[in-house]
Amino acid sequence: MQTIQIGGSSLKSSRLAYGCWRVAGTWNPEEVMPEREAAGRRAILTAYEAGYTLFDHADIYCMGAGEKIFGQVLKEVSGMRERVVIASKCGIRKKGDSTPAAPYRYDFTAPYILQSCEASLKRLGVEVIDLYQLHRPDYLCDPAEVAEAFSKLKQQGKVREFGVSNFRPSQVVMLQKACPMRLLVNQVEISLARLNCFEDGTLDQCLAETMTPLAWSPLAGGQLADVMPIDLRAEDHAKRIGLREELEHLARERGTTRTIVALAWLMKHPSGIVPIVGSTKGERIKEAVEAVDFELSREEWYLLLEASRGERLP
Ligand code: NAP
């Protein structure tokens, strides 16, 4: 697969990343049975064999089960660790974490970042995480404290590079100002069904600062893909149907699938968006790779933008 330099650094990734959010097949760690682990391992291995080299994790994905399953694959496949970029995240704490009364919350305190990283390294079974991201902005974030934690992790050789996720441009500026190392990525929701980042300055900032936008839910959790039904109770369902029709029309005209068109649409943006593919089905994981070499014209790109907006541009 084609590659891309992450945030202009020496970290090189495949043009598409593979997301491990769903690999445990459940959100409940108590339901992770050997068959589910085996299916998760198969999905990861399929992605690796299809040429994906960036694997995205978070400590909260099935409470660490996703990282553990990935760790098992790394043990089984010789040479894989050296060929992949391991990304993970921290900063979200589930309800009941540490005390029964504790609410769901965000935590960027230095001790929590350090402890989370340590736990992820252990589950993944590796010495170093290549890209460590803060999952969602902590309302009580003290940038100096985050910088201290990041510096310690870097010094200890536990993390190579750092990034953020779901940050607004102003939050990136705030944290970058305090950090001695560059923040290489902002992992955000971008898809034809979610255009915010085109309009709120996120992608402009990525271009200006040579940060790589990693796009989560690039197929809107499957809604843009080929067989997923549209929820007719959703307020904007008419717009979504219009978008799907335009995608379908273009895909047919070009002899391809909606999935490929939707992923190619993201990759056409000059900021170098890296879509994080989230399917757990081998065929879909492989199919997505075709999007890397699929070129959309500017006219086709704008047709889809218009369909997504549900109205003409001003
Ligand atoms: P996605 O690719 O938009 O959606 C994947 C989902 O769509 C899967 O449930 C998949 O089901 C389904 N799907 C895919 N192709 C389909 C098709 N042709 N027909 C029907 N269904 C189809 O991405 P995502 O999984 O939502 O997110 C991708 C990654 O982004 C995650 O793994 C995670 O790494 C990251 N993420 C990050 C954040 C954040 O806050 N930073 C939030 C969410 C996700 P099957 O498995 O059955 O194919």
Image (cartoon, grey):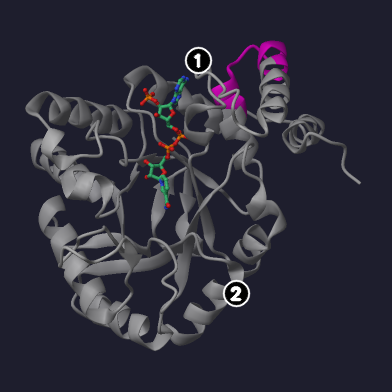
Q: Let me know if residue 125 appears in the view.
A: no
Residue under label 2: 170
Look at the numbered disc 2 and give the secondary structure of its residue.
helix
At which x and y percent is residue 276? 44, 41
Question: Is disc 1's CB within 8 Å of ligand 1?
Answer: yes
Which contiguous range is marked in magenta?
A: 249-261
Q: Amino acid at mark 1?
A: Val
Q: Mainly helix, strand or loop, the magenta region?
A: helix
Q: Name above or below for residue 85 compared with residue 255.
A: below
Residue under label 1: 227
Q: Which mark is residue 8?
A: none
Image quarter for ligand 1 equals top left
- Going 58% across and 17% down the picture, which residue do you hit? 257
At which x and y percent is residue 281? 33, 22
Q: Amino acid at mark 2?
A: Ser
Q: As drawn, is 13 to the left or to the right of 193?
A: left
At which x and y percent is residue 256? 60, 15
- Going 26% across and 72% down the picture, which residue do you hit? 113
Q: Name above or below for residue 247 compared with residue 176.
A: above
> Per the image, is 314 magenta?
no
